Amino acid sequence: MNRHQFLRRLHRQLRPRTYLETGVADGRSMTLSRVPSIGIDPAFRIDQEIVADVHLARIASDEFFAREDPVAHLPISTVDLAFIDGMHLAEYALRDYLAVERFTHPSSVVVFDDMLPRTVAEAARHRHTAAWTGDVYKAVQALRDHRPDLIVLEVDTFPTGVVVVLRPDASRDGVMAEYDDWMDIALDPDPQDVPEEILTRSRAFKPEALLASDGWRTLRDLRDLPPAEAAAAVGQAFSGLLQPTR
Ligand SMILES: C[S@@+](CC[C@H](N)C(=O)[O-])C[C@H]1O[C@@H](n2cnc3c(N)ncnc32)[C@H](O)[C@@H]1O
């Protein structure tokens, strides 16, 4: 299953009320949305029909999220589903996550693309391969290390894997206190020291197994609960997941 097939099925399972993506390019992932949406990309060039009521911002995501009310286009101030697929460098991906988290509810889902590079070359900060993930996988490592409250699931999609983050916490207000210390490590020059678990996908869920979870329906039911109550229920909703398999 590739990233777009996974996303298409996630849209169906989760039935988000709103969608946001960083990195729009030709619009292929945006075509999957059927709900009020925001797409951010300084260089998008849409070449297919987008069905959703979408606000396209031709601007870098850092600038977009610095606006006073970045999600003004949406009918509600909550982003139910976000796809982070903009600049393929770890610090940009992490900032995109922290910025969009401000507009989430614990029932929201954030998906990162290109999280499972297949080779060290593909994970280079300086692109020199056809398929390129860059080192965005480190953004998720930062969340694993500094945000144990989040549920972080690697997914074995073709070609370069995605990560699903559950139970975001808007009350963090876009801040990760360890960001500056993390940056010192994150910006290591190439070649990157990509962890074995990432290259082998040993922690990754089969996309079909994850999509088959009843948890997605439960997330929909949690949307109207106060954040603390919903957060407590999210872990339980996914506790029945199969163990990761290759
Ligand atoms: C891999 S493409 C996105 C593909 C698209 N999401 C899809 O799946 O069909 C990455 C895009 O990120 C955009 N990009 C680069 N830097 C960015 C930034 N700072 N903020 C938002 N988008 C950025 C690029 O212009 C490029 O179009």
Image (cartoon, rainbow, N blue to C red):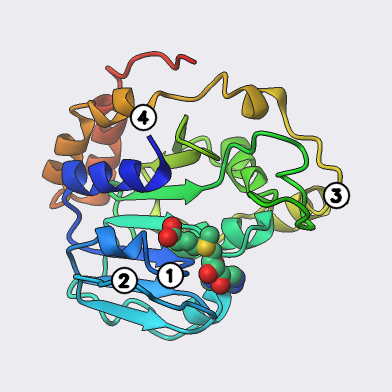
Q: Residues within 10 Å of mark 3 (few under 14, many from 20)?
A: few
> Is residue 245 visible from the viewing direction of this image?
yes
In the visual, does 156 lie left or right of 232? Answer: right
Q: Which residue is mark 2?
A: 48
- Please tell me which of labels 3 and 4 falls first in the chain: 3
Q: Which residue is mark 3?
A: 188
Q: Which residue is mark 4?
A: 207
- Please tell me which of labels 2 and 1 falls first in the chain: 1
**Mark 1 secondary-structure assignment:** loop
- Type of amino acid under label 3: Asp
Q: At which x and y percent is residue 51?
A: 19, 70
Rendered residue at 72%/29% (across/down): 195
- Disc 2 to disc 3, how far (Cα)? 38 Å
- Please tell me which of labels 1 and 3 falls first in the chain: 1
- Disc 3 to disc 4, how far (Cα)? 31 Å
Q: Does the beta carbon of the residue at mark 1 sit less than 8 Å from ligand 1?
A: yes
- Please tell me which of labels 2 and 4 falls first in the chain: 2
Q: Are marks 4 and 1 in contact (CB under 8 Å)?
A: no
- Please tell me which of labels 2 and 3 falls first in the chain: 2
Q: Does the beta carbon of the residue at mark 2 sit less than 8 Å from ligand 1?
A: no
Q: Which residue is mark 1?
A: 26
Task: State which mark lies toward you, 4 or 1.
Answer: 1
> Is residue 171 visible from the viewing direction of this image?
no
